[in-house]
Image: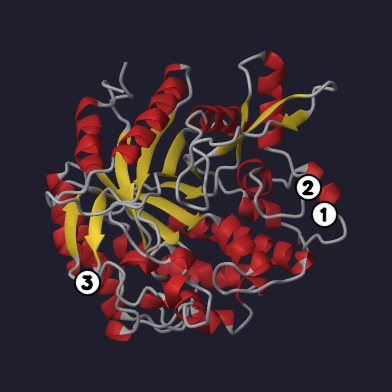
Amino acid sequence: MTFPAAFTWGVACAAYQVEGAPAEDGKGPSVWDMFCRKPGAVWHEQNGDTACDFYHRYAADVALMHELEIPAFRFSISWPRVLPEGIGRVNMRGLDFYDRLVDSLLAADITPWVTLFHWDYPLALYHRGGWLNRESADWFAEYTGVIVERLSDRVQHWMTQNEPQCFIGLGMQTGYHAPGDQLPFAQVLRAAHHALLAHGRAVQVIRARAIAVPTIGFAPCGIVSMPARETPADITAARQATFSVTERTCFTASWWMDPVYLGQYPAEGLALYADALPDIQDGDMTTIAQPLDFVGVNIYNGSVVCAGPDGRPVSVPLPPGYPKTMQDFWPITPTALYWGPRFLYERYGLPIVITENGHQNADIISLDGQVHDPQRIDYLHRYLRELRRAAEDGVPVSGYFQWCFTDNFEWAMGDAIRVGLVYTDYPTQQRIPKDSAYWYRDVIRTQGAGL
C-alpha cells in the first residue's frame, strides 16, 4: 500500500529558528530577540542571531531541497521583518526576502506553504499589551493583508498560527518561552481568546484578498491519547481523553480546536474555567470559526489510557526504560500518528495534514564525514507506517511535513538537540544531509510503499 497520489510530502522550518539577521535590512525586534537576552532563559545563553543564516543562504538550501526531491516547504514569515513596529510602516526589504524565497521555491518545483505566525511576535506590539490587547486581532489582520497582497499570486497554501498552546501556554503561563511571562490563568485565557480571534480575522483577510484560490488551515499541537488495547472500551476512553479539558493548562486540543472548527468552546472547559473566562463578545465565535480547508496538527507523541471501571479514561504509565527522544525525554509513541488523525477527522470532518513530526537526537559528524542517524530513520519509519494505516482505514490524510529540514535554533534549548534531516555545522554553516534525508527522499519517491 502507498499514500494517496495527491499526498503532499514536505519539510518545515520557522523564521526565528533559521533566518538569523535579526536587525538586518530594517527588521524590527521580536519577543524572542528580547527573551534570548534574559540571563538563563536559553541553554548556554544562546540566541537566534545567526541560527542557520537562512536569510543569506536560502538559495543554497532551496537547491538542496530540490536535490533531495522535497515537493513542499512549510516556512513561517517573520512578522517584525515585514512590519518592524508590527503595524503601519512596511519594510519593503524584508518583504522582498520572502518574495525571492517564494520565487526560488517555485523555480525548484517546490510548493510553498506559508505559516503567518510561528512565535516571533513584534516587540513593539508586546509593549502595547501583545495578545492581552484585544486589538491584537486587528494587528494580525493588517499584517496578514500585507503578506497576502504580496505573495498570494504564487502562494496558495496558508496556515495562520503555529502551536498557540506554546506561544500562549509556554510564553505567558509558565514563562518557559518568549516573552517569558507568568500570568494569572484568567489573563492567559484572555490572551488565548485574542489569538483565536486573530486566527479568524486572518482567514477572513486571506479569503477576501488572495489572488490565487487559497487552501487554509492552522497548526496547533496535537494532544493525543491512545488506547492501551484496541478494544471498543479503550478506544472510546482514548477519544474522550484526547478532547478532554481537566486541568488549568493550555495544553489541550479542544479548547483551541473546537472554537475554530465547531464554533464553540468545549463545555467541559467552560465549566472548569468558569472563574477565569475571557470576555467573549457577540460575534467572536463566528469570527473565530471561519471555514477552513484542512486540520493541521503537530504530533510528536501521545499518552496511553485505558477504560476504567466506569468507562472513563485512566492513564497507563509507560514502563521503565521506555524509548524516548532527547526533547524533554519525549516518549516514542508511533500510534499517535494513527489515533490522532483518526480522532481529529471523526470530530472535525476535514482532511488531516501533519504539519510537524520528527525526531530529536544528538547527531554528530562521523569519522567518514557523514551523519548517520539510524534512530531518526527508525522513528520516522514507525510513525509514517501508522499514518499510512490511518489513510488505509479511511482517514483523509493529505500531507506530512517533517520537522525539520535543517538543524536549527531549538528555542529555549538552543543547539542542545538536533532535529533536522540535514546537519548544520554552525561554525561553518556547512550543510550535510543525514542518512535520514536520503531515506526520506526514497519514501517520497515510492509514496511510502516500502514502509
Q: Disc number at residue 449?
A: none
Secondary structure found at label 1: loop
- Image location (x, y in percent) of residue 277: 80, 60
User: Which of disc 3 and disc 1 is earlier in sequence?
Assistant: 1
Q: Is residue 388 above or below residue 69?
A: above
The Cα atoms of the two marked residues, 1 and 3, are separated by 48 Å
Look at label 3 and name its amino acid.
Pro
Query: Mark 1 or mark 3, which is nearer to you?
Result: 3
Residue at mark 2:
269
Residue at mark 1:
273
Residue 96 picture quarter = bottom left
Residue at x 69% of width, y 21% of height: 234
Label 3: few (<14), some (14–19) or many (≥20) C-alpha neighbours in 10 Å: few
Residue 416 visible at all: yes
Secondary structure found at label 3: loop
Relative to 366, is 195 on the left or the right? right
Quadrant including the N terminus: top left
- Image location (x, y in percent) of residue 84: 41, 82
Look at label 2 and name its amino acid.
Gly
Residue 209 visible at all: no
The Cα atoms of the two marked residues, 1 and 2, are separated by 6 Å
Label 1: few (<14), some (14–19) or many (≥20) C-alpha neighbours in 10 Å: some
Residue at x 48% of width, y 60% of height: 205
Residue at mark 3:
427
User: Which of disc 3 and disc 2 is earlier in sequence?
Assistant: 2
Look at label 1 and name its amino acid.
Tyr
- Image location (x, y in percent) of residue 434: 22, 46
